[in-house]
Image (spheres, grey):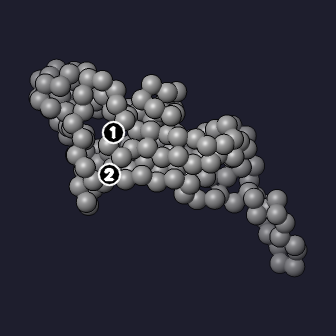
Amino acid sequence: MAINPNTNFTAGLVLTAAQQNRFPRGVMALATSTTNYVVTTTETIATGMTVTFTAVASRYYKVTYYEPTITTPSTLLGFVASRIRLTNASGTQYQLQYSQTNAATSYTVGNNNFFVGTFSAGSVTLVGCLVANTTTGTPTAGRSSTQPSILVVEDIGPA
């Protein structure tokens, strides 16, 4: 992963466009949801977890998908998998995280996936997906107005 950091700035010198373009550009896309989501055994885009932005091929992006509360199935080794994917629920996977129980009872945990990398230039759609290996005990993604789920894309600088 090549990094192209900025230079030191000295008083009296001219600030160039190339130097300006090395700064991060910040948030490129943001989605939030306060609606609870019941996780099924079919991988699906979680409610509200879709973003689209225009990527520049020579820049790094940090993608974060956060679910404040995941309740696992209530079976031994029951799990909920969360993924960051390109375009749709069967698109290229960029990140995967499991929340799994080691007993025949459910448990609740926060879930945070992130990916750092580049994309091809142009319009890019990313999605946050959830799937469970069983629906025993009703696995859910719990959300509220004070604990929303978040899918955010940040431009963090040049490649």
Residue 33 appears in the picture as rendered:
yes
- In the image, residue 154 above or below residue 90: below
Could you tell me if residue 118 is visible in this image? Answer: no
User: What SS does tag 1 mark?
Assistant: strand
Is 7 or 24 nearer to us in this picture?
Answer: 24
Whether residues under marks 2 and 1 lie with C-beta atoms below 8 angstroms apart, the answer is: yes
Q: Which mark is residue 138?
A: none
Q: 124 left or right of 106? A: right
Q: CA distance from mark 2 to mark 1?
A: 9 Å
Residue sticking out furthest to the bottom: 12
Horizontal relation, residue 108 to residue 155: left or right? left
Which of the two discs, 2 and 1, labels the residue nearer the N terminus?
2
The answer to which quarter of the image holds residue 19 is bottom right
Residue 48 percent across, percent down from the top left: 36, 46
Of the 4 image quadrants, the one containing the N terminus is top right
Q: Which residue was labeled with disc 2?
A: 33
Disc 1 residue type (three-letter): Ala
Could you tell me residue 148's position as x and y percent? 30, 54
Q: Amino acid at mark 2?
A: Ser
Q: Residue at the location (71% across, 49% down)?
A: 158
- Residue 111 point in image, percent of width and height: 33, 41
Residue lying at the far right in this picture: please name it.
13
Residue 46: assigned label: 1
Using the rendered view, name the quadrant where residue 9 is placed: bottom right
Q: Residue at x 41, y 33 (%)?
A: 83
Name the residue at 53% across, 40% down. Answer: 125
